Image: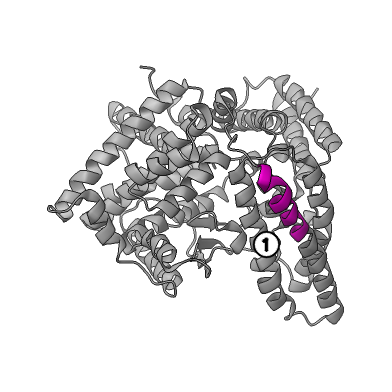
Amino acid sequence: MPSSSTAFQSLSEAILKAYYDFHPTMAVSLGYHQYDGKLPDWHPEMIAGWVDTVRHFQQQLAQIDSSTFGAEQRLDHTVLSLALQEEVFDWEELRDWQRNPMTYSDYCDVSGYLKRNYAPLEDRFRGLIRHLRNVPAFLETGWANIRRPVPKTFVATAMEMFNGHIRFLNENLPAQWDTLPDEDLRAEAQQARDLARTAIAQMLDHLKNELLPEATQDFAIGTDHYSKLLRFGEMVDMPLEQLVRMGEQDLARNEKAFVGVARQIEPDKSPREVLTTLASHHPTEQSLIDDTRATLDDLAQFIRAHEIVTIPSDIPCIVAETPPFLRWAFAMMDTPGAFEEKATEAFYYVTPVEDNWTAQQKEEWLRKFDYYTLRDVSAHEAYPGHYVHYLHYRQTPSNVRKTFGAYSFWEGWAHYIEEMMLEEGYGDGDPRLHLAQLSEALVRNCRYLVSIRLHTAGMTVNEATQFFMKHAYMDELPARKEAERGTFDPGYLNYTLGKLILRKLRADYAQKQEQLGETFSLGAFHDQFLSYGAPPIPLVRQQMLDDQVLFPAK
């Protein structure tokens, strides 16, 4: 009879293989290009079969005795167990495949075949062509799956995303196939593009003429689902009332600091006026990308000089405009998959203004990228945020943890480092940079509280918009964008939640080292923290402190 350790290794490999087979586009994004061109089959009977398979895996996993495992394997066992619970929850209870047309948009994205040079261009185009040919059937299944009525923000955002895909297929793709020497392959690409574009246009027609007129404001997932979202995804099982109190306390802390720093900069102006003055110093729509690129070297030099965290690679990330179908966010990092062997390009996307916006809308958008906020956002996305985390993540020895990660770890780390960098001296105490950091922290504080209230307390999008405008000093357009995001991304509370859990872990870890007579090293702490991959932070706490108490109940 095989040992429990051997049995777990075999079972985890079987689970991962089945997961990739059901989620082939996820497998491609991780770097498994044998899945190139494949799209998932989301007919209801296939989904039901997949859920049955996951439940069977859960039973097998529960039968394995993990008491004899080493620390790393115990960690993998828990991560895999949580991932299976979350998978059943997503398909059986949240059911975004039936309630949110945005769910189907990501599968129209073929940019990954072009932006990373993991194989000869001709081979990548063959995968792209297969992918595009599968789009019509996938979207047809998606339209059949949608249950009416649908929340209005879901429909409106899905329309933006699908329109972005059409723009990409019309404007970006032809420039790539023009470089192909094979005329037949170019013709195949154009034909596949036309088929996919027609299917996307048909989906847009459905959304505009059938779903939008009857769309509702009924987006809330409810208290039970919200609690499960945190329990399975982040391993956080706390009363919502305690979570709200924590969020309100951190909001009050940052609001008080914001007012104090604003008075330090301009004593005779209100905090909003000071922020407005800072926001007026921003890149132009033409210089946004170049100005963003210029911040990265400075950040990397500071990190190395002050031993904040190890940067495992000298290869910088690439700053580029956000693709049209992802422009619901201000900025984001797009890294290669953890298993990608040849393509190392990581993209730091910054969202430009839209050509059809008014001058006022363009100005409101660019004010969010003032030169001080731009340094804060670049720290979050690149150094030492997401990009540096990704470089450590690639080195994780566990395939389980290279596949599954926690929202609160990814975003909690990136948000935590914004404040930590200033505490360590970045910016030489410039209060304007501090105000920008606090401004971003207030946005995340608002996300935290708005998320809970939108989904469990009846808050409306209009009320959420006003909350962002009041507490994060935002203009109406970006405030409404943030509020709308909360309707379809309840997990965006994890920026602040992850930061709070990580700061508590750091404080408790430093105290433990002091009690043991050891010297606390911030860089060593960060390196050890990132070495685990991206599991729920409470699991990292167990590894580093042998302690499961996140925050004492009050």
The answer to which of 193 and 269 lies nearer the viewer is 269
Q: Which amino acid does label 1 sit on?
A: His
x and y, in percent, of residue 448 in the image:
43, 36
Residue 313 included in the magenta stretch of the image: no
Residue 547 at least partly seen = no
- Start and end of the magenta stretch? 200-214
Residue appearing at x 37%, y 65% in the figure: 295
- Which residue in the rendered view is the most extreme toward the front? 213
Q: Quadrant of residue 296?
A: bottom left
Q: What residue did someone put label 1 on?
A: 165
Q: Is residue 504 visible?
A: yes
Determine the secondary structure under disc 1. helix
Q: Does the magenta stretch include residue 206?
A: yes
Q: Residues within 10 Å of mark 1 (few under 14, many from 20)?
A: many
Q: Quadrant of the C terminus?
A: top left
Residue 232 lies in what quarter of the image? top right
Q: 463 and 277: which one is in front?
A: 463
- Residue 344 is situated, as x and y percent measured from the top left of the image, at 60, 63
In-front residue for pair 503/439: 439
Residue lying at the far top in this picture: please name it. 554
Compared with residue 181, is residue 116 higher up or lower down, i.e. above or below?
A: above
Q: In the visual, does 197 lie left or right of 274? A: right
Up the image or down, 170 lies above or below 276; here it is below
Q: In percent of the image, x 39 and y 32: which residue is there?
A: 505
